Amino acid sequence: MLKRVLTIVVMIVACGLGPARAEDAAAPFDGDLQRLAEILGTLHYLRGICGSNEGAKWRNEMQALIDAETPSGDRRARMIAGFNRGYNGFQQTYRTCTPAASVAIRRYIEEGSRISRDLTARYAN
């Protein structure tokens, strides 16, 4: 399942969801990108406490998403804030891996996969 999520995120990165924009105007898919950023932050934290030994994998996926989208100004800040919100929100809730954390990981991977698939289907060249 993780390989599937990674593949989908890589597809988004490879397709470049949109051309670089000089202005900070919101793109029609910004809400989805912000949610995906939040999910990546959540996974970065939860997979770490659950002993996945993935290191910075999810942070690197977030960086790849930012690099592909090349947002500037407010758009970039919103994406980064989403990642941090996901990370910090679960950091306040979970100190160790629990069955509930494992369920949350599975659900966030499924949601992230769905968002990635939908974005790719709608906006990829």
Image: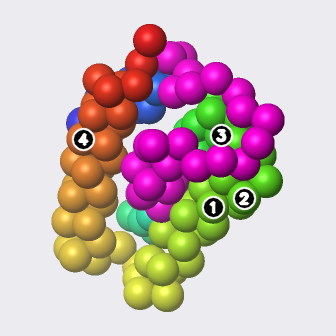
Q: Residue at x 72, y 48 (%)?
A: 24
Residue topped by disc 3: 66
Callout in the foreground (4, 1) = 1
Question: Residue 6: horizontal and vertical position, in percent?
Answer: 41, 31
The answer to whether residue 25 is magenta is yes
Could you give the CA–CA distance between mark 2 and mark 4, rounded to whole angstroms? 25 Å
Residue topped by disc 4: 114
Stretch in magenta: 13-40
Question: Residue 46: horizontal and vertical position, in percent?
Answer: 42, 65
Helix, strand or loop status at disc 3: helix
Residue 20 visible to the viewer: yes
Could you give the CA–CA distance between mark 3 and mark 1, rounded to whole angstroms? 11 Å
Lower sequence index among marks 4 and 1: 1
Helix, strand or loop status at disc 2: helix
Quarter of the figure with residue 123: top left
Is residue 104 shown above or below 30? below
Quarter of the figure with residue 105: bottom left
Residue topped by disc 2: 74
Callout in the foreground (2, 4) = 2
* Callout 2 amino acid: Asp
Instruction: Tell whether label 3 touches label 4 (CB within 8 Å).
Output: no
Could you give the CA–CA distance between mark 4 and mark 1, rounded to whole angstroms? 21 Å
Residue topped by disc 1: 78
Quarter of the figure with residue 100: bottom left
